[in-house]
Image (cartoon, rainbow, N blue to C red):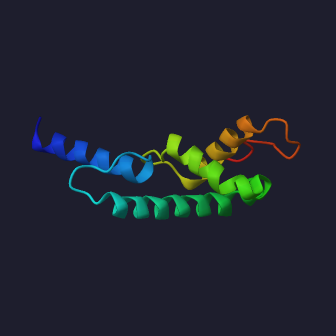
Amino acid sequence: MSARERLAARQAELLAALLADGPAPAGFDAEALRVEADALLAKRRRVVALIDPEVAEACGEDFAPLFAEYARGNPRRDGSRAREDAAAFAAWVGARRPKRRWWRGGRRG
């Protein structure tokens, strides 16, 4: 494996730890990574709530835990936009709460 490939693999490990609830890579402080991952998740959640406040409000107290579950399974893709993330969350949560009248899911993009 080349030096470039090793670096790419280490970077992927770090991103997985920060964005997808992955384990801390060797040589990194697990607690510091957890704090940073929580901050990044909170920022992403705030952006989605700003873009689509109706979905966040409709989720009520469940918004934060639902978004955390969504984010763990759906890390942001390279080059994706926040509006795409908000629309994907709306569709994701809509599929889990199909019986609610308020749900229109996937209406923005």
Q: Nearer the viewer, residue 21 or 80?
A: 21
Q: Quadrant of the N terminus?
A: top left
Q: Is residue 45 left or right of residue 35?
A: right
Residue 54: horizontal and vertical position, in percent? 77, 56
Residue 72 or residue 76, whichever sits in front: 72
Which percent across, then down, holds residue 51? 66, 59
Say which residue appears at 41% left-offset and 59% top-offset.
34
Work out whether residue 32 or residue 58 is closer to the camera in this orientation and state it.
32
**Which is more toward the observer, 107 or 26?**
26
Q: Residue furthest left?
A: 2
Instruction: Name the residue: 30% across, 45% down.
Output: 13
Give the answer, above or below, for where 68 lies relative to 99. below
Tell whether 21 sits left or right of 45: left
Residue 10 location in percent, x, y? Answer: 23, 47
- From where the camera sits, is residue 42 visible? yes
Q: Is residue 14 above or below residue 95?
A: below
Residue farthest right in this picture: 101
Percent of width and height locating residue 61: 73, 58
Q: Farthest residue in the front direction?
A: 31
Q: In the picture shown, does residue 42 fall above or below 103? A: below
Q: Residue at x 20, y 55 (%)?
A: 27
Tally of numbered discs: 0
| Left or right: 42 in relation to 20 | right
Q: Is residue 74 visible?
A: no
In the image, what residue occupies the spot 45% across and 44% down?
A: 77
